[in-house]
Amino acid sequence: MSSAQEAFVIQVGSVFGSVGGGYQFLPNYIFSAPNGSVVSFIFTGSPGNHTVTQSSLTTPCEPLAGGFDSGWIFVLNELLTPPIWNLTVTDDREPIVFHCKQDIPGSHCSAGMVGAINIGDFDSLDALTSAAAKATHAGQQQGGLSGVGAVATAFPSIPAGATLLNAFAGSPVLQSAPSATAGVPSSTSPPRSSNFNTQMSFTSIPSSSVSTFDVPVPSSSSKDSFPRTALIVGVVSPVIAVLIALLLLLVWRRRRRLRRHDSNTQVDPLINNGPSAASRLPSKAALNLEIRLAHEQLRDVEGKLRAQPSSRGAQDSGDDVGRLRERVVELTAEVERLRLLGAEAPPAYSIG
């Protein structure tokens, strides 16, 4: 059993219209991650509402009992510093399978949002994605920080512009930053659609950036709960539909405005100066070149992360790793910005 420490980065979600669509992990596999390796999940998909939930090879779209769960990470617009969740490998002898349990508008897992650590080879990965494609929906059980073969020491870091939705004692909590007093999510299973289209009653609006709301879980033994729930859903669903439509319009208008602005001010990335440089709009080939260069820098930084010598002082090594990880985040955000610049149409769905 190896004890070498390595660092890996996996992008959670992508931009609609990109290769593979918005429902994917990039990459969706790590063939070999020794014990002690840190896997950083970076939530760059926007707009998106995703999870990193542990499952198994046989049922890749069902949460594994006792498995890890990042909670719901909702990112409306692209962020310079996206949410990050670090997972440490504790048992490298078996594959560690993960998926997104989002089920709206359809199962993200069966659409391809599934992956694995220490999967071994592409044949095993193909078998995993094929099994996921056969699932009709994803289970909604809530996991915690500790999983089987991997563990997280903290909830995802949530910058301004993103939200974390987690289950504590059966009631989800929406927050713009991790709460210092919050406990580990319980194993209570919330309603299948509790992430969005359920009854929501705001209990308070504090002066800080943290807001909470209660999501009641109906009792299966109550005979009159169904009519009440049906009435509530009938009233709330049109409101949610209107909100979704407004979000779509706002995101589309914002991206259209950005594209119009870029068409007037963008400088050809292949030309550093010249009187006509500011008036040129980069071609697809130029954008692809910038993306490729950013990817090469990203691979170079990731290689430096893995090559950190263990004999250096703890403080110096920690500082180097921190700077390299910040560079990984910057390069990942740059790649997404370039992909967005090359997009020709707004996304068809705003809260995926």
Image (cartoon, grey):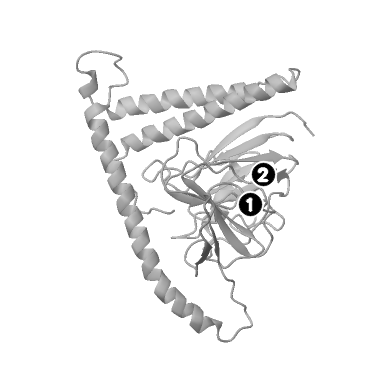
User: How many residues crowd around disc 2 within 10 Å: few (fewer than 14), some, or many (20 or more)?
Assistant: some
Numbered badge on residue 154: 2
Kindly report which numbered mark, 1 or 2, lies closer to the viewer in this rendering.
Answer: 2
Residue type pointed to by label 1: Asp
Where is residue 55 drawn, in percent x and y?
64, 53
Label 1 sits on a secondary structure element that is loop
Spatial separation of the CA atoms under disc 1 and disc 2: 11 Å
Report which quarter residue 320 is drawn in. top right
Q: Earlier in the sequence, mark 1 or mark 2?
A: 1
Instruction: Decide if residue 126 is on the left or right side of residue 169.
Output: left
User: How many residues crowd around disc 1 within 10 Å: few (fewer than 14), some, or many (20 or more)?
Assistant: many
Q: Are marks 1 and 2 in contact (CB under 8 Å)?
A: no
Q: Does residue 98 appear in the picture of this structure?
A: yes
Q: Residue at x 45, y 74 (%)?
A: 233
Say which residue label 1 marks.
Answer: 69
Residue type pointed to by label 2: Ala
Report which quarter residue 244 is drawn in. bottom left
Instruction: Decide if residue 211 is on the left or right side of residue 263.
Output: right
Q: Which quadrant of the rendered structure holds the N terminus? A: top right
Q: Is residue 43 above or below residue 313?
A: below
Q: Residue at x 23, y 13 (%)?
A: 274
Where is residue 227 drawn, in percent x and y?
49, 84
Count how many numbered circles sit on residues in the image: 2
Q: Is residue 258 above or below residue 225?
A: above
Report which quarter residue 345 is drawn in. top left
Q: Residue at x 64, y 31 (%)?
A: 7
Instruction: Decide if residue 330 is on the left or right side of residue 308.
Output: left
Label 2 sits on a secondary structure element that is loop
